[in-house]
Amino acid sequence: MKPSNQTRLRDRAPLALGVWRVIGHLVGVLAVAGIVAAPFFSTQTVQGIWQAAQFSGFSHLIGKEAVLHLGVSACFWAALVLLFHALRSSFKSPERAVRSRRGSVMTETLIVIPVALLLTFGLAQLAIVNIGGILTNLATVQAARTAWLWLPEVQAERRGVTRNRVVDLARIQAAAIVAPTAPSDFQLAGTEGSEFFRNMRGVLVGTQLNSPPNDSGRQGKERALQLAVSDGDAASGKEISFNRALDFSSFSTRTARKFSFAYLATEVSLIQTGEQVGARVTYKQLCVFPIANHIFGSGDTVGPRRGSYAAITREFTLHQQLDPNAKMPRQ
C-alpha cells in the first residue's frame, strides 16, 4: 500500500524543521558577530581593510581572526539559546516545594564558583588576546611597509642606513599599533630602546600636552621619560588581579608605559625571498587575568616583568621596489 500525501508530508516535517533550525542558528550567530563587530567599524576602518586586501597574504592574516570571532559569537549565541530554553521551561513547570539538605547550598556554591570564575576570566582574557591578534595583523602590515620602504636604502648603501636601523624602525611602527593591548601598570628604567624609539614616544606624549609650546617634541620626550620612570609597580607577575588587567591610570601615563612595553614585547625580523620583501612580527601578549593566564600563555620575561605571555606571530610581504640609484642626486 502506497503512503498517502499526508504521511509523506508528516515524514518530511522533522527534516524541514531541522533545516530551518540550522538556518535560524546560523543567522543568529552571524547577527551576534555583526553586533559585536559593529562598534569597531567606521568609514576609515573599512577603507583601511579594503586597501590592505589588495596586498598578497591579507586573507591568510585575517582568516584565523575571522574564524575565532565566529567561534566566540557561536558560543555567545549558544549561551543565549540555553538561557531562553531554561527560562521557558521554568515558566511552564508547575510550582513545587524544594527541600534541600543542610549544607547543600554551600556545597553547590563551592562547586559553581570555580567554574564561574574560570568562565569569567577566561572570556575576558580571550577577548584581549583576540584584540591583540587583530592588532598584530595591522602591526605586521606596517612593519612590512617600513621594510619595503627602507631596505632598498640598505642595499644601495646610501646615507648610512643599516639593516639594524630598518629592523628598529619596523619594530617601532609595530609597537605603536599593538600598544593599546600592552599593560601600563609598571615602571621602566628609562634607558630602553633606541633614540628613534624615544623620539616616537615623545611625539605620542607631546600630542597630549596642554597648550603645547613650539618645541613640543622636546617637551614631550622629557615628559614621556618622567612618566615611564615615575612611581609605579614593577609587577613581577605574582600580584596579578582583575584590577591590574584593566587600565586605570591617566592617558598620558598609559601612552608612555604602554608604548614602551609594546616595544619591549615586540620582535621583528625582515623577510627577503625572491622579489618579495616584508617582515615577521612576534608580539608577546601579557595575560594577567587570574586563573586564565596560564591557559593562554606560558612563562616568560619581557623587560622588567615576569609573567604568562601568549606569543602572536604574523608575517606579511610586498613586491619589492626597483633598486635605487646608489648615487644621490646633486644638490
Image (spheres, rainbow, N blue to C red):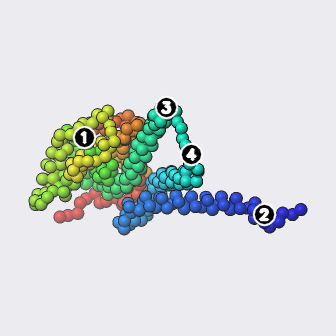
Picture mark count: 4
Q: Amino acid at mark 2?
A: Arg
**Residue 133 visible to the viewer:** no
Which residue corresponds to mark 4? 96
Numbered tag placed on residue 303 in the rendering: none
Numbered tag placed on residue 8 in the rendering: 2
Q: Residue 242 location in percent, x, y? A: 34, 42
Q: What is the CA distance from the residue labelled 1 to the residue labelled 3?
A: 48 Å
Judged by depth in the image, the label closer to the viewer, 4 or 1, is 4
Q: Secondary structure at mark 4?
A: loop
Q: Earlier in the sequence, mark 1 or mark 3?
A: 3
| Residue drawn where x is 29% and y is 60% of the image | 325
Which residue corresponds to mark 1? 186
In front of the other: 275 or 279: 279
Q: What is the CA distance from the residue labelled 2 to the residue labelled 4?
A: 42 Å
Q: Amino acid at mark 1?
A: Phe
| Residue drawn where x is 47% and y is 36% of the image | 105
Q: What is the CA distance from the residue labelled 4 to the residue labelled 3?
A: 19 Å
Q: Secondary structure at mark 3?
A: loop
Asked which quadrant contains residue 214, the reply is bottom left
